[in-house]
Amino acid sequence: MYDAIVVGAGPIGSYTAYRLAGLGYKVLVFERRPKVGDAACCTGIIGKECFTHFPIVNNGVLTQYSSAKFFSPSGKCLRLSKDSVQACVVDRPAFDRALAQKAQEEGAEYLFSARVEDISFRDNCVKATVECKGENRDFEGRMAVISSGFGASLPQRLGLGKISDFVLGAQAEVKVGDLKEVEVYFGQEIAPGFFGWLVPTSGGKALAGLLSRRSPGSYLKNLIASLLAQGKITSNETKIIYGGIPLSPLPKTYRERVVVVGDAAGQVKPTTGGGIYYGLLCADIAAEVIHDALRTDDFSAKRLARYEKGWKAKLSRELEIGYWARKTYERLGDRQIENIFDIIQANNIHESILQYPDFSFDWHGDSILRALKNEPLAKIFGR
């Protein structure tokens, strides 16, 4: 009998395991892949605030950035720059492995090549039925934490609903020349309704990727061909990896003896698709609520509802503003996107927002609302 069983050994699952094991609980983590860090479709950009708030995640950093370039459909460029570092790019496999190692050092156990087929309920525990190396095995825990990423079927099977809106991502590692800054590309021909990116990492390499509701691989191949023609990358021989990214939260993230955290719960920035920092914040809340449930031996839905109340108090405003901005942007054509670039540049909106003392790489709601105080910009967004 474990105190907590954790489904998924991504950064959010491992951090939750680390917190609970550090509190003295017996924790078991299931990972369906043979090892931690396999097949992570993630650019690995993490804001400096995350590293400040969670020193434990300061692992696998490849490079740091204080600026970025944004390109309109016609190629107009807006450059945003701060004097201080705003974000880091991490090696995601190394980052994930380091967090798992921290959890193991605290005493958490890991079981690999272990796919959780079902979670059922008994009077005093949950039972996880796990397919492990060709055979089914049962494990029991007083609590279950689902952190198995977007697309996990367990939440829906447990009556928690399913995420209603998501986007597809495609990414590939490419070779680059003298590329110093993150570049972001907008336009219907590049990534309809979303954006593409080129993120230098280390050793003359970069990550090229984009988000799209349809055919992300085809759009990425076109983007890579364009970057090659511009001389920004030096080779188009790449392996494309894919992933789904939630844009809206799971309808319910708890029930008796169960909580859902991270991408599986839809705790992701709708503006950019970044989920590591928000997921870690929610994992902290989950760990405290689970600690209280284990301490009092009360695993009722009423007790665990405090988890959802806590993370929504932290994130709901950001998620709602970001989702509205995301859906509104999706309706814009290239001409309107060009107008946005022109308005921002003519009114120096981007520089003004950067000067606010509370400007944050991770919290976009206030920046969006400040930008929309410009009347021409507000008209484009229908406000």
Image (tube, helix red, strand yellow):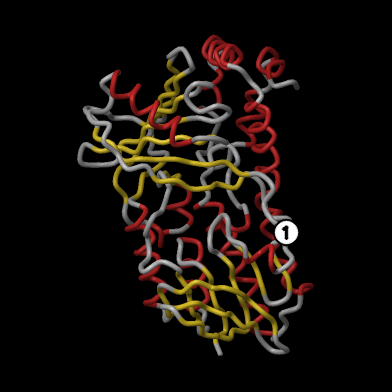
Q: Nearer the viewer, residue 51 or 139?
A: 139
Q: In the figure, 272 relative to 219: above or below?
A: below
- Residue at the (25%, 21%) spot, across then down: 231
- Residue at the (51%, 82%) spot, across then down: 136
- Residue at the (58%, 48%) spot, across then down: 268
- Residue at the (21%, 36%) spot, across then down: 204
Q: Is residue 24 visible?
A: no
Q: Is residue 116 visible?
A: yes
Name the kind of residue labelled 1 in the image: Gly
Residue 51, x across and y down, in percent? 43, 52
* Quarter of the picture holding the N terminus: bottom right
Residue 92, x across and y down, in percent? 37, 53
Extreme residue in the front direction: 134
Q: In the figure, 261 relative to 316: above or below?
A: below
> In this image, 278 relative to 198: left or right?
right
Q: Which residue is mark 1?
A: 161
Q: Nearer the viewer, residue 283 or 55?
A: 283
Residue 353, x across and y down, in percent? 55, 26
Q: Residues within 10 Å of mark 1 (few under 14, many from 20)?
A: some
* Quarter of the picture holding the C terminus: top right
Q: Write down the quadrant of residue 291 in the picture.
A: bottom right
Q: Secondary structure at mark 1?
A: loop
Q: Nearer the viewer, residue 361 or 258?
A: 258
> In this image, 133 relative to 194: left or right?
left
Q: In the figure, 277 relative to 286: above or below?
A: above
Residue 112, x across and y down, in percent? 40, 74
Tally of numbered tags:
1
> In this image, 61 relative to 126: left or right?
left
Q: In the figure, 312 relative to 239: above or below?
A: below
